[in-house]
Image (cartoon, rainbow, N blue to C red):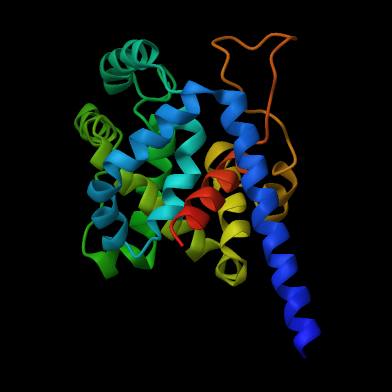
Amino acid sequence: MIIRKIITLLSLLLTLGSSIVFSANYQHEFGDDWTQAETFVREHHADWKPIFDEFGVDARIAEAIVFPELIRYSHWQDAIETATVKGVYVSGGSEKANFSIGRFQMKPSFAEEIDQEWNQSTLASEFGFKFDVRNNSDARSSRVKRLGTIEGQCRYLAIFIRLMYLRHPKLQSLSANQQVRFLATAYNRNHRATWQQIIAQQKHKTFHTDLLKTRHTKTYRYCEISVRCFLKNTCSSR
């Protein structure tokens, strides 16, 4: 019994140790961008947590899901794309303009899908609100306003997570690390994909921080960055 406990403890230490090493590697890889993203999360965690709590979502998981987006966030690029979305998307829809905007880099089409799925789910009646999903400029303008604030994006992120748990009940039986890996992949690639597709997409290296992707661009697994962030935050909070 004692030997078994020792082996279990050693396995746990090795797991935590390797996660810290990997996190340190990513910190070195992304340098100041990683540090600034960490600082941003730390400074806003107290403001975000009540929003995630409202929807029964673990704030650490939510923050880890979008952490890669915080790493590659660009103020000037976001300003240009947000202005385009406010003008062109509101008048013409996502077929005319569908840029990722805000700190969490959410597309209007993503918000549209979340709005529609929320309205059709049992969660809408449970929480007592629905979104305006009409195909007109008023509904699109309201959607852009929600996406235009960090609080609005936190709500969309929380709702996305709740919808994923609802769509994939077995997700909650996974470890927290595996949940982060699955949810981060769905967020980055396609949240409407099947369980098998999302599992397969976890292996794909598509994330990068270059302005334009070239043959020299280094790519990463989005979900692995999220997991490293989650493990680092979990270990440091113990």
Percent position of residue 189, x then y: 60, 37
Please identify the quarter of the rendering in which residue 145 is found: top left
Which residue is drawn at the image coordinates 47% and 22% (left, top)? 32
Which residue is drawn at the image coordinates 26% and 14% (left, top)? 87
Position of residue 238 relative to residue 216, above or below, is below
Which residue is drawn at the image coordinates 75% and 77% (left, top)? 6
Position of residue 31 relative to residue 203, above or below, is above
- Say left or right for 156 vs 175: left
Please identify the quarter of the rendering in which residue 216 is found: top right
- Say left or right for 87 vs 105: left
Percent position of residue 193, x then y: 62, 47
User: Would residue 15 be visible to someone looking at this image?
Assistant: yes
Of residues 33 and 117, the one nearer the viewer is: 33
Percent position of residue 27, x then y: 57, 31
Of residues 50 and 14, the one nearer the viewer is: 14
Q: Quadrant of the N terminus?
A: bottom right
Count of all numbered marks drawn on residues in the image: 0
Percent position of residue 119, x then y: 33, 56
Which residue is drawn at the image coordinates 59% and 45% (left, top)? 228
Position of residue 28 relative to residue 187, above or below, is above
User: Would residue 105 be visible to someone looking at this image?
Assistant: no
